[in-house]
Amino acid sequence: ANAAEWRLTLDPISFIHRFRGHLLLANNTDDFAFQLEAHRATWQQARQTRDGADVWLEVGMPHSMPNARRPQILRYVDFALNGGQPLPCLTPLTRSGLTFHTSLKYGAQAVRARLWLTTDPGGFDLTKSGVSKWTKRRWRHIPASLNGSSITATLPADVTERPVRVFIDATDATGYTCSTHFL
């Protein structure tokens, strides 16, 4: 009964479809409380109702509400409400073979882009220490190519294990980063 009440009243996927306007969904890739697959499902629900469901995935970002006061989030709010400088938000990630593509949105500029990847499975199974597997995924990154607003990256040949999860992030000259969601 508690799970049903939580889903109805607190789970973002239950009400996000009613939200209008710009939305930044920020999350740690290995968050113990809001696993990446659930975060992605919320983002997909938001994308079905409007353009502007932006993502910021960060490897190793701490789980904490003080993150809501980080300057990056305040800058996004200024952009969304006042037309301020945009973050380097990205279009949804697409794939052609082993090459991944995204583009910068809102006229934003980037000085660096990376392809992040992991072959660690994650999921709901607990390790022997009692820690959920998704909190222990090992992520690595390689440089992605920037060409104007277009960003591409190819999965390295040494990545042969499956499944593999990938996402791209972009960082602007002020050090702020946004990302795609994972494929």
Image (cartoon, rainbow, N blue to C red):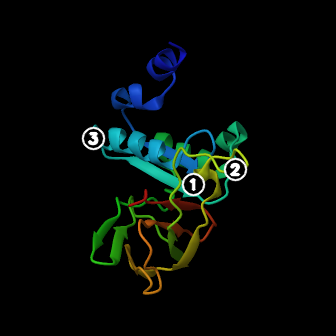
- The amino acid type of the residue labelled 3 equals Gln
Q: Secondary structure at mark 1?
A: loop
Residue of label 1: 29
Q: Residue at x 55, y 47 (%)?
A: 26
Q: Which mark is residue 48?
A: 3
* Closer-to-camera residue (157/143): 157
- The amino acid type of the residue labelled 2 equals Lys
Circle 2 Cα neighbour tier, 10 Å, few/some/many (<14 / 14–19 / ≥20): few
Q: Pinpoint residue 34: horizontal percent, then vertical percent.
A: 56, 40
Circle 1 Cα neighbour tier, 10 Å, few/some/many (<14 / 14–19 / ≥20): many
Q: Pinpoint residue 91: horizontal percent, then vertical percent.
A: 35, 60
Does 23 appear above or below 157?
above
Query: Which numbered disc flags the more N-terminal residue, 3 or 2?
Result: 3
Q: Residue at x 50, y 67 (%)?
A: 119
Q: Pinpoint residue 169: horizontal percent, then vertical percent.
A: 50, 66
- Quadrant of the rendering where the C terminus is positioned: bottom left
- Please report contact status of discs 3 and 1: CB closer than 8 Å, yes or no: no
* Closer-to-camera residue (105/129): 129
In this picture, residue 124 sits left or right of residue 98 = right
Nearer the viewer's eye, disc 1 or disc 2? 2
* Closer-to-camera residue (145/44): 44
- The amino acid type of the residue labelled 1 equals Thr
Residue of label 2: 128
Nearer the viewer's eye, disc 3 or disc 2? 2
In this picture, residue 22 sits left or right of residue 76 = left
Q: Which mark is residue 174?
A: none
Q: CA distance from mark 3 to mark 2?
A: 39 Å
In this picture, residue 27 sits left or right of residue 107 = right
Q: CA distance from mark 1 to mark 2?
A: 21 Å
Query: Which numbered disc flags the more N-terminal residue, 3 or 1?
Result: 1
Does 168 appear above or below 44?
below
Does 12 appear above or below 86?
above
